[in-house]
Image (cartoon, rainbow, N blue to C red):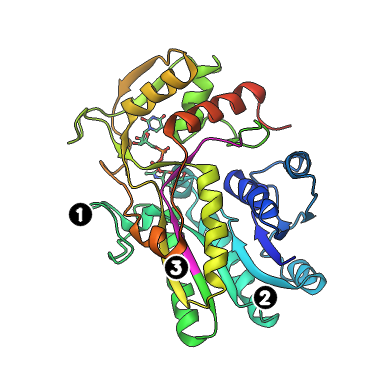
C-alpha cells in the first residue's frame, strides 16, 4: 500500500479525501493541528472505512515534529490541505494567514526535499483567477491579484511550487483549483463543521434548515446575472475527493507541474441553490435580500475539459444530492462534530 501524507486530513475536504484514498487502497497518514477540525473525525473515518489512519496532532510549521513523521514513514506523495481559509478573517489577521499558510507550505517543502518525497498535490482555489473577464475559467488564464490575504497565500504557494519544479525538474506538483465544494459524506458522519457563524453559503443554509438560524441573507440581487444573484460552480465534496485520487494516479506519470480546475463546469445562482435545497429536503428556506458582500465576483465557473481529458475525472453527483447530504449531516450533527 502506498503511504501518502495528508496535511489537514481532519478538515472538511481533507477527511473526505482520506476516506476516498482508503477506499482506493492508499494508506493515508494524517497530520492536523486541530485548529479548525475535531479529533473525533478520526474515529468517524474508521467507522466508515474500517481503517484507522496514523494521526499526528502537530502544526506543520513545527519542523522537528514533522521531521519525526517523515522519518517514521515512507511517503509516495503529500496532499497538502492544511491552512487557514476564512476570507474575511484573513483581511483582519493578515500576518496570521501569511505566517500559517506560507510558513506551513515552506516547512513541508523543506522536509519533502530532505526526505526526497518528490510528489505534491496542493489545494488551491478558483480565487486565484480573481474577477473573471472571460468564462469558463481555464487553467491557461493568468492569475490575478487576490482581493484578500487568504487568496494571496494560494497564489504565492502556486508560484513557490512552480519555481521549485523549475529548479528541480524531477519533482511533480499538481495544483488543484477547487471551485465551491459542498455536501457531506452520505453516512452523515463527515461534513462541513464551521466554528461560529458560517461564512459559506451551504453551511449557512443548512443551519437555517434545522432552525438554528432563522433566515439566510442573500448577498445582493443586483448583479448582472439572470436573477441578479451571484453564480458559482458548486461540486459535491466526494467528487472533489475523487479528483485527488485521479491526481495521484496522474502524478505516477511524472508530469512535472500541472494545474487542474476541479468543478462541474456549470454555474448556479444563490436563488437556484436555495431552490435546489428546498426541493431536496422538502423544507422552506426563509431568506432576505441584503447588500452585496465585499470581494464577491458576479460569476465564476470552471472549464473542466483539461481534468476530464488528463485526469479522466469529472464531477458526477447532482446538486440535489449535495444539498440532501449537507442537510442530513447538519441534522445529525446540529452542534457540529463532537
Ligand atoms: C469563498 C471565498 C473563496 C474561498 C471559498 C472557500 C470569498 C469572496 N470567496 O468562495 O475565496 O476559496 O469561499 O470556501 O469569500 N452567500 C450569500 N449569503 C451567505 C453566504 C454566501 O448570499 O450567507 C453567497 C455569496 O455572495 C456567493 C455565494 O453565496 O455568491 C457563495 O459564497 P461562499 O459559499 O462564501 O463561497 P465563495 O464566496 O464563492
On the image, which quarter does residue 297 sit in? top left
Residue 134's disc number: 1
The residue nearer to you, when weighing 75 against 194, is 75
- Distance Cα–Cα, label 1 vs label 3: 21 Å
Q: Residue at x 65, y 47 (%)?
A: 15
For disc 2, the neighbor class at 10 Å (few under 14, some 14 to 19, many from 20) is some
Asked whether the viewer can see residue 104, the reply is yes
The span shown in magenta is 174-185
The verdict on label 1 being within 8 Å of ligand 1 is no
Asked whether the viewer can see residue 32, the reply is no
Residue 151's disc number: none
Q: Position of residue 228 (x, y in %)?
A: 21, 29
Mark 1 or mark 3: which comes first in sequence? 1
* Position of the C terminus by quadrant: top right
User: Ligand 1, what quadrant?
Assistant: top left
- Distance Cα–Cα, label 2 vs label 3: 18 Å
Q: Position of residue 96 (x, y in %)?
A: 55, 55
Say whether residue 46 is magenta: no
For disc 1, the neighbor class at 10 Å (few under 14, some 14 to 19, many from 20) is few
Q: Position of residue 223 (x, y in %)?
A: 20, 34
Left or right, 291 with reference to 86? left
Q: Position of residue 301 (x, y in %)?
A: 31, 47
| Cβ–Cβ under 8 Å for marks 1 and 2 | no
Q: Residue at x 52, y 63 (%)?
A: 247
* Position of the N terminus by quadrant: bottom right
Residue 111's disc number: 2
Mark 2 or mark 3: which comes first in sequence? 2
Q: Residue at x 49, y 18 (%)?
A: 281
The verdict on label 3 being within 8 Å of ligand 1 is no
Residue 158's disc number: 3
- Distance Cα–Cα, label 1 vs label 2: 39 Å
Amino acid at each position: 500500500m502506498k503511504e501518502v501524507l495528508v496535511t489537514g486530513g481532519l478538515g472538511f475536504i481533507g477527511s473526505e479525501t482520506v476516506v476516498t484514498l482508503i477506499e482506493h487502497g492508499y494508506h493515508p497518514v494524517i497530520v492536523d493541528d486541530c485548529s479548525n477540525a475535531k479529533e473525533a473525525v478520526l474515529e468517524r473515518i474508521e467507522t466508515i472505512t474500517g481503517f484507522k489512519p496514523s494521526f499526528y496532532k502537530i502544526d506543520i510549521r513545527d519542523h522537528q515534529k514533522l521531521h519525526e513523521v517523515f522519518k517514521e514513514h515512507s511517503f509516495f506523495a503529500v496532499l497538502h490541505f492544511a491552512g487557514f481559509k476564512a476570507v474575511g478573517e484573513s483581511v483582519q489577521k493578515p500576518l496570521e494567514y501569511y505566517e500559517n499558510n506560507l510558513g506551513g507550505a515552506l516547512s513541508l517543502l523543506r522536509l519533502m526535499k530532505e526526505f526526497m518525497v518528490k510528489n505534491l498535490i496542493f489545494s488551491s482555489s478558483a480565487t486565484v483567477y480573481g474577477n473573471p473577464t472571460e468564462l469558463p475559467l481555464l487553467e491557461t488564464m493568468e492569475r490575478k491579484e487576490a482581493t484578500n490575504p487568504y487568496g494571496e497565500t494560494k497564489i504565492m504557494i502556486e508560484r513557490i511550487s512552480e519555481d521549485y519544479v523549475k529548479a528541480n525538474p524531477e519533482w511533480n506538483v499538481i495544483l488543484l483549483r477547487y471551485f465551491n465544494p459542498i455536501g457531506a459524506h452520505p453516512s452523515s458522519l463527515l461534513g462541513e463543521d464551521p466554528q461560529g457563524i458560517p461564512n459559506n453559503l451551504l453551511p449557512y443554509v443548512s443551519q437555517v434548515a434545522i432552525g438554528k438560524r432563522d433566515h439566510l441573507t442573500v448577498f445582493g440581487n443586483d448583479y448582472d446575472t439572470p436573477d441578479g444573484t451571484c453564480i458559482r460552480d458548486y461540486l459535491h465534496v466526494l467528487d472533489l475527493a475523487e479528483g485527488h485520487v485521479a491526481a495521484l494516479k496522474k502524478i505516477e506519470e511524472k508530469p512535472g507541474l500541472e494545474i487542474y480546475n476541479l468543478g462541474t463546469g456549470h454555474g448556479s445562482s444563490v436563488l437556484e441553490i436555495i431552490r435546489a435545497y428546498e426541493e431536496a429536503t422538502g423544507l422552506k428556506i426563509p431568506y432576505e435580500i441584503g447588500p452585496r458582500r465585499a470581494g464577491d465576483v458576479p460569476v465564476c465557473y470552471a472549464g473542466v475539459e483539461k481534468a476530464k481529458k488528463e485526469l479522466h475525472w469529472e464531477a458526477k453527483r447532482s446538486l440535489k444530492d449535495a444539498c440532501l447530504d449537507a442537510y442530513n449531516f447538519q441534522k445529525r450533527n446540529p452542534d457540529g462534530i463532537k
